[in-house]
Image (cartoon, helix red, strand yellow):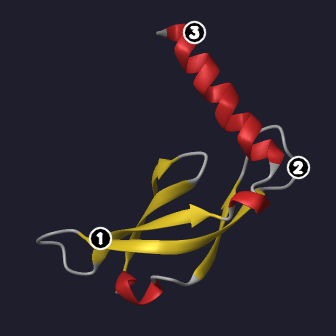
Amino acid sequence: IIRDLSFSGAMILVTGVGKFLVDKDAKLSIEIEDRANPVVLKSKIVRFEEYPDQKGIGTVAIGFYEEEIPMAYKMRINDYLNTSRKHN
């Protein structure tokens, strides 16, 4: 489950022992409505945070490899932010 999403990374809810994933490469695949193929974000897991009182559940923070972030993703996040500002 994606908990937080930004231009540079994401927080992902995970089950299991996430501390062993830190410093590993990862890929986050996101489907966008008007695209035929999902956007794939190459990344590295930079941190794991276990939920207190919830053994085996936590979040991993992933940082996207900046030079490999697809323009389609950047544009979609930018469009969302612009739309959100107009409504506030």
> Callout 3 environment at 10 Å: few (<14), some (14 to 19), or many (20+)?
few
Which tag, 2 or 1, sits closer to the chain's start?
2
Say which label, 3 or 2, has the lower sequence index. 2
Q: Taking 52 as reference, is 16 above or below it?
A: below
Identify residue type, mark 3.
Lys
Res. 16 visible in picture: no
Disc nearest the viewer among 2 and 1? 1
Q: Position of residue 65 (x, y in %)?
A: 68, 65
Q: Residue at x 74, y 45 (%)?
A: 73
N-terminal of the pair, mark 1 or mark 3, is 1
- Relative placement, left or right, of 27 versus 3 is right
Q: Would you say 62 lies left or right of 59 here?
A: right
Q: Quadrant of residue 81?
A: top right
For the image, the number of numbered tags is: 3
Question: In the image, which disc is placed on residue 5?
Answer: none
* Residue shown at the point (62%, 80%) measured from the top left: 25
Say which residue label 3 marks: 86
Q: The residue under label 1 is which amino acid type?
A: Glu
Q: Is residue 58 visible?
A: yes
Of the residues shown, which amino acid type is indicated by label 2?
Ala
Q: Nearer the viewer, mark 3 or mark 2?
A: 3
Q: Secondary structure at mark 1?
A: strand
The answer for how far apart the CA atoms under marks 1 and 3 are is 34 Å
Q: Nearer the viewer, residue 33 or 75?
A: 75
Question: Residue at point 46% right, 85% down?
Answer: 21
At mark 3, the secondary structure is helix
Please tell me whether residue 33 is drawn above or below residue 81 in the rendered image.
Answer: below
Q: Which mark is residue 36?
A: 2
Q: Which residue is mark 1?
A: 49
Q: Secondary structure at mark 2?
A: loop
**What's the CA distance linking mark 2 and mark 1?**
34 Å
